[in-house]
Image (tube, rainbow, N blue to C red):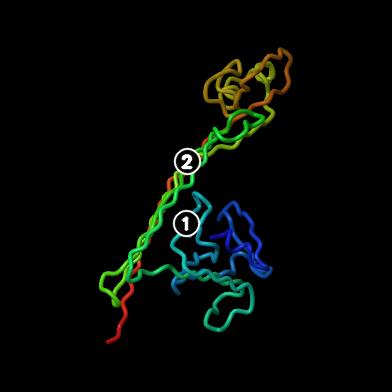
Amino acid sequence: LQQLQVIQPGVQQTFTSSFGKQVSMGGDRVANNRFLQEGVDLTWTFRTSPVSLASNILMGADAVKEFKVLTENPSVEYGEQSGGVTSTTLKSGTNNFHGTLFEYYRNDKFDADNYFGPTPLHRHQWGGSIGGPIRKDKTFFFTDFESLHADSAYAFASNVPNLAARTAATTNSTVQQIFFGGTGGNGSNPLIPKCQVDTSSTPGFCVFTNNPVNQVREYYGVVKMDHTISS
């Protein structure tokens, strides 16, 4: 849904370390936006985009029927905030049964290798929706479900003291234990990691590379029922 927001004039996406991907509307602060779904306020206490901090996305796009972004000067019915307003309306059931299924899959086997080594990527996003009648012309239902399983990694490279520098750095066993994992600079579980390749016998630096995997498991579901009150 954030991708639908940023194609509107006056909307700019930004990333914050505390609240993930956010949008600025009409030049206002990201904390001054308002987010409505079916007229219900989804805005967080700090007025930031109601995204998942795990995946930095707002799931459930397949369930959206209408999407509206007001970047500035909203009418009095919205009020409360000085920033933009994002309003979404969900799909509803009809007299006929309708449904959708989708699957989106990514794998690092399909990508070129990173310069610093392989970076695992397994992203599996799938879901579906169905809607129909409970009582013809009167009562309808709609439900949507979406699942996201993602295992991704980013390559990091940094200069750290090589083994020769660790050994010569200090004779204090406590310092050796804390920073280098033990006397001799080659212990287990050091605060400053050791390089995978370290061939120099001269004190200096070597390159340590790492690609920790970030695991995300997220699920989204919604059920909507509509009833027409008429004769």
- Quadrant (top left, top right, bottom left, bottom right) of the C terminus: bottom left
For the question of whether residue 107 can be seen, the reply is yes
Kind of element beneath mark 1: loop
Q: Mark 1 points at which residue?
A: 59
Q: Position of residue 41 (x, y in %)?
A: 46, 71
Q: Which comes sooner in the sequence, label 1 or label 2?
A: 1
Q: Name the residue under label 2.
A: 215
In three-dimensional space, the C-alpha distance between marks 1 and 2, rounded to whole angstroms, equals: 17 Å
Rendered view: 74 above or below 144: below
Q: Which mark is residue 83?
A: none
Q: Position of residue 15 (x, y in %)?
A: 62, 54
Rendered view: 142 above or below 231: above
Rendered view: 141 above or below 115: below
- Dot 2 crowding, Cα within 10 Å, few <14, some 14–19, many 20+: some
- Given the current orientation, which residue lies at the most extreme front position? 96
Foreground pick, 65 / 47: 65
The quadrant holding residue 111 is top right
